[in-house]
Image: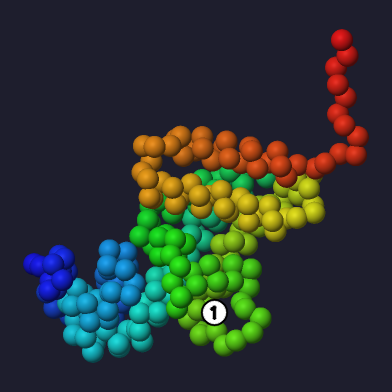
Amino acid sequence: MINEKGGRAVKPAKRTRLPAAERRAQILTVARDLFVTQGFEHASMRRIADAAGITPTAIYDHFADKEALLTAIAADFFDGLVAAMTVPPDAATDPLGLLRQLMINYVRYGLAHPNEYRLVFMTSLSRFVPTLGHRGLPCSGVVPAEVAQKTVKAMHSFGILQTGIERLVAAGLLRADDPEGFADSVWAMGHGIVSLVITKGDSNFTPIDRWIDTSIGILMEGMRPRYSTPPPTSSR
């Protein structure tokens, strides 16, 4: 089917009755895919409804507008990310091993959900700030309830990483002067790996686990404690 602009149109789904929870999940899946393939601005509520097999008015029984859809997609994504990054205490016996496992889980989860990851972390939509408040809500202005809820989930996922950094500081493996900056740096490393593989494919890069090990090793060198006296040098 070709639309009036010459592009391939989305084939409307057959209209069937679904329980409210299943319908909500279906609408989110359809919206996620259309936001990625057609762009947020072009994927209208009518197009989303048609692709989901419901009437244009019925979609508003579930979501007020596209911003609400996008925020719900992000909230669901963060629920899964928090679950993926919740490492059992006995899964890593040392702080460095825990940090490594956290980032492996982060990267694997992001790569398993590339469309959601694109929308949450790889877009710059003026009406939706996907990384809003990973440390907290804005100090001023009115924040819609659904955005506040999503922000709390983003804070939770980032808090897991920051706790891992704090364990390294407590063990004397990292300096104590900038734990927040260290957490941002480790997150940026994980995000860089996910975004590069999503856009370029994994065949272009080092295997994921080894790539993470190398990246963490490089970061650790820059975050280790600085000693007042240089280490002893061997004499000839």
Examine the image and state in which quarter residue 213 appears: top right
Question: Split into 4 quadrants, where in the image is the C terminus?
Answer: top right
* Residue 101 location, quadrant: top right
Using the image as rendered, state which of residue 102 and residue 197 is in the foreground.
197
Residue at the front extreme of this rendering = 5
Location of residue 4 in the rendering, given as x and y in whole percent from the top left corner = 12, 74
Q: Residue at x 64, y 68 (%)?
A: 135
Q: Residue at x 57, y 36 (%)?
A: 214
Q: Which residue is mark 1?
A: 148
Query: Callout 1: few (<14), some (14-19), or many (20+) C-alpha neighbours within 10 Å?
Result: some
On the image, the x and y values in percent for residue 201 come to 36, 44
Number of marks in picture: 1
Taking the view exactly as shown, the residue that stands out farthest to the right is 229
The picture quadrant where one finds residue 159 is bottom right
Residue depicted at x 19% and y 73%: 51
The colour scheme is rainbow
Element type at mark 1: helix
Residue 139 horizontal/vertical position (percent): 66, 81
Q: Residue 31: where, in percent of width, then height?
A: 30, 72
Q: Residue at x 18, y 78 (%)?
A: 50
- From the viewer's side, name the closer residue of 117 and 41: 41
* 77 w.r.t. 174: above or below: below
Image quarter where the N terminus lies is: bottom left
Residue at the top extreme?
A: 236
Q: Is residue 23 visible?
A: no
Type of residue at label 1? Ala
Report if residue 71 is visible in the image.
Answer: yes
